[in-house]
Image (cartoon, rainbow, N blue to C red):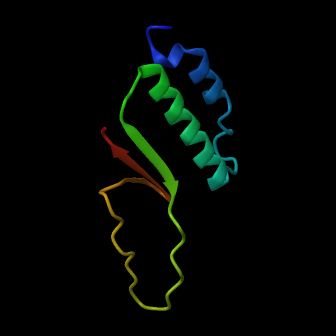
Amino acid sequence: MPDNLQDHPLIKALIAELPAPGSVWPIDDRLRWLRAFNSTVAFLRGDKGEIRIEKIPEWPFLQAISVERPPVPSEPKGFGDLQIYHQNT
Protein backbone atom coordinates (compact mmCIF):
# COMPACT_ATOMS: atom_id res chain seq x y z
CA MET A 1 0.00 0.00 0.00
CA PRO A 2 1.33 3.51 -0.77
CA ASP A 3 2.55 5.56 2.21
CA ASN A 4 -0.11 8.22 1.62
CA LEU A 5 -3.76 7.39 1.10
CA GLN A 6 -3.92 10.04 -1.63
CA ASP A 7 -1.58 7.88 -3.73
CA HIS A 8 -3.64 4.70 -3.35
CA PRO A 9 -5.29 3.53 -6.62
CA LEU A 10 -8.71 3.18 -4.97
CA ILE A 11 -8.62 6.79 -3.72
CA LYS A 12 -7.40 8.02 -7.10
CA ALA A 13 -10.25 6.15 -8.82
CA LEU A 14 -12.84 7.75 -6.52
CA ILE A 15 -11.37 11.23 -7.01
CA ALA A 16 -11.49 10.69 -10.78
CA GLU A 17 -15.25 10.11 -10.48
CA LEU A 18 -15.90 13.57 -9.03
CA PRO A 19 -17.84 15.86 -11.37
CA ALA A 20 -16.25 18.98 -12.81
CA PRO A 21 -16.38 22.06 -10.56
CA GLY A 22 -19.56 24.03 -11.12
CA SER A 23 -21.41 21.11 -12.71
CA VAL A 24 -24.66 19.67 -11.40
CA TRP A 25 -24.12 16.91 -8.84
CA PRO A 26 -27.45 15.52 -7.61
CA ILE A 27 -27.71 14.90 -3.87
CA ASP A 28 -28.22 11.13 -4.29
CA ASP A 29 -25.05 10.90 -6.39
CA ARG A 30 -23.12 12.94 -3.80
CA LEU A 31 -24.43 10.70 -1.06
CA ARG A 32 -23.38 7.55 -2.94
CA TRP A 33 -19.89 8.98 -3.61
CA LEU A 34 -19.37 10.10 0.01
CA ARG A 35 -20.40 6.67 1.30
CA ALA A 36 -18.04 4.94 -1.14
CA PHE A 37 -15.19 7.27 -0.14
CA ASN A 38 -15.91 6.75 3.56
CA SER A 39 -15.96 2.95 3.19
CA THR A 40 -12.76 2.95 1.15
CA VAL A 41 -10.82 5.11 3.60
CA ALA A 42 -12.09 3.06 6.57
CA PHE A 43 -11.04 -0.15 4.82
CA LEU A 44 -7.58 1.13 3.89
CA ARG A 45 -6.95 2.54 7.38
CA GLY A 46 -8.46 -0.44 9.22
CA ASP A 47 -10.81 1.87 11.15
CA LYS A 48 -13.12 0.16 13.62
CA GLY A 49 -15.56 3.04 14.21
CA GLU A 50 -18.60 3.80 12.12
CA ILE A 51 -19.39 6.98 10.23
CA ARG A 52 -22.93 7.26 8.96
CA ILE A 53 -23.62 9.62 6.06
CA GLU A 54 -27.26 10.31 5.31
CA LYS A 55 -29.54 12.76 3.56
CA ILE A 56 -31.67 15.01 5.74
CA PRO A 57 -35.33 14.98 4.76
CA GLU A 58 -36.56 18.30 3.44
CA TRP A 59 -38.45 20.39 5.94
CA PRO A 60 -42.00 21.32 4.95
CA PHE A 61 -42.35 24.89 3.83
CA LEU A 62 -43.82 27.10 6.53
CA GLN A 63 -45.31 30.49 5.73
CA ALA A 64 -43.95 32.65 8.50
CA ILE A 65 -41.76 35.68 8.92
CA SER A 66 -39.10 33.74 10.82
CA VAL A 67 -38.66 29.98 10.64
CA GLU A 68 -36.03 27.92 12.43
CA ARG A 69 -35.29 24.25 11.81
CA PRO A 70 -35.66 21.93 14.79
CA PRO A 71 -32.39 20.63 16.26
CA VAL A 72 -30.83 17.53 14.70
CA PRO A 73 -29.96 14.73 17.19
CA SER A 74 -26.50 13.34 18.02
CA GLU A 75 -24.45 16.49 17.41
CA PRO A 76 -23.81 15.95 13.67
CA LYS A 77 -21.23 17.76 11.60
CA GLY A 78 -23.14 19.23 8.67
CA PHE A 79 -22.29 19.95 5.05
CA GLY A 80 -25.24 21.74 3.44
CA ASP A 81 -28.03 19.23 3.11
CA LEU A 82 -25.91 16.24 4.26
CA GLN A 83 -25.19 15.26 7.84
CA ILE A 84 -22.33 13.05 8.95
CA TYR A 85 -22.56 11.12 12.22
CA HIS A 86 -19.58 9.40 13.83
CA GLN A 87 -19.84 6.60 16.36
CA ASN A 88 -16.85 4.89 17.97
CA THR A 89 -17.22 1.21 18.71
- On screen, 67 above or below 14? below
- On screen, 66 above or below 40? below
Image point (68%, 32%), residue name: 17
Q: Which of the 4 image quarters holds residue 67?
A: bottom left
The quadrant in which the C terminus is found is top left
Task: Give coordinates of residue 29: x percent, y percent.
Answer: 66, 48
Q: Residue furthest bottom?
A: 64
* In the displayed structure image, the side of residue 43 where residue 47 appears, left or right: left
- On screen, 79 above or below 56? above
Task: Give coordinates of residue 71: x percent, y percent.
Answer: 33, 70
Image point (36%, 75%), residue name: 70
Image point (50%, 35%), residue name: 38
Task: Give coordinates of residue 52: x percent, y percent.
Answer: 45, 47
Q: Which of the 4 image quarters holds residue 48?
A: top left
Image point (30%, 39%), residue name: 88
Q: Residue furthest front?
A: 89
Q: Count the marks: how many?
A: 0
Task: Give coordinates of residue 16: x percent, y percent.
Answer: 66, 27
Q: Nearer the viewer, residue 84 or 46?
A: 46
